[in-house]
Amino acid sequence: MAKAPAKKSAATKKKAAPKAANAEKKLVAKKAAAPKAVPKKKATKAKVVAKKAVAKKPAAKRTKKPSAKQISGYGMGSVDVVMSVDQVVKEAASIAADAPSPKKLNKLANDKPFLTIDNLNAGYGKMEILHNFTLQIGQGQSLCLIGPNGAGKSTVLHSIFGFTNIFSGKISVKGKDVTNLTPSQKLAEAGIAYILQDKSVFPGMTVEENLLMGGFLKNKPAEAKIAAEMVFDKYSRLAERRDKPAGVLSGGERRLLEISRALVMNPDVLLVDEPSIGLEPRFIDMVFELLDDLQRRDGKTIIMVEQNAKKGLEFADIGYVLVSGETAMADNGKDLLANPDVGRLFLGG
């Protein structure tokens, strides 16, 4: 009687085993039918990537290539897109297709040119920088040359003063051919003075000694002394520092000394290369006030190259835009300043 329950238990176990196996099979099938966790994660990750892509779309719009009206930035001013020099040259060259005629240049000089350059081809060594370049300026006028780097602006000044090789063409002052004169002859005989870009003072010499160096072509030392005293009478700022070494002067005072030294020879024409370079804004204003005084009161004829195109055109009676050694545009300084192409290419907007 005691063994019967044991048999029953074994039978029960045998019957339960298939049920458990069936239950396990159903569970496995159910798990297999259910979506796997890994694909869910992948789907979620894909959604995140998609969302990021959508979030980046506005940035793509901001980097969209700007239209011609939006492009600006060569020279000065705040800009959104900065044009490369190559871009400026390319666009300015297209403008140069309508280059100013000699008749227009003569009109800008009030039909009475004092200094003229006719079809000048000039450069350094065998390299030609200026190509059939023409310029006209009247006595007592000011002219500013602007343009991209490498356009030949400083080469114009160098050619006038005798620092380049002249392959062909002619330079005249008051009707006299001065093309082949040496720099010393141009200063002494043609009344042309060249004011270098910067750092041309002798720092170990006094202010007075620097001024006297400007009169090195005077026949007698006493003549240079008299001319220097006239400069001191004109500019008290230098007179107060006449015995000081030039090396202790401020940037603006050094520039004043460089310009004043050129005045010792009492020239008719001033060639001024980058008058504002390296100066603080307050000294830049001082230098341009000085140049204005020399032009308006003393009747000096001024030809300048100025990297601050806006300042140069505000000052000058005439403005020339040079591109690849040729004159692309020429007009009154104020009219050129208001020209939208000049503003876009050289003034930052």
Image: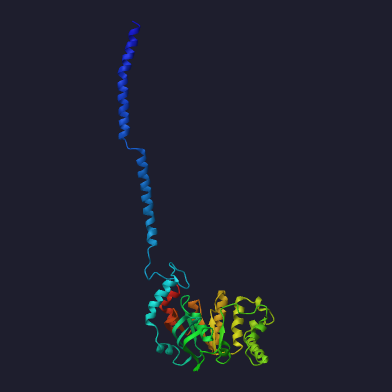
Q: Can residue 137 be seen in the rendering of this structure?
A: no
Specify whether 296 is left or right of 246: left
Q: Position of residue 348 (x, y in %)?
A: 45, 72
Relative to 253, does residue 15 appear above or below in the rendering? above
Depth order, front residue of 136/319: 136
Q: Can residue 271 be seen in the rendering of this structure?
A: yes
Q: Position of residue 209 (x, y in %)?
A: 67, 83
Relative to 100, does residue 150 appear above or below in the rendering? above
Relative to 18, does residue 56 appear above or below in the rendering? below
Q: Quadrant of residue 248?
A: bottom right
Residue occupying the point 31% across, 34% down: 32
Depth order, front residue of 349/268: 268
Specify whether 93 is left or right of 261: left
Residue occupying the point 49% across, 83% down: 156
Q: Quadrant of residue 337?
A: bottom left
Specify whether 71 is left or right of 217: left
Depth order, front residue of 208/180: 180
Q: How many marks?
A: 0
Residue occupying the point 31% across, 14% down: 11
Q: Position of residue 210 (x, y in %)?
A: 65, 83
Of the 4 image quadrants, the one containing the C terminus is bottom left
Of the 4 image quadrants, the one containing the N terminus is top left
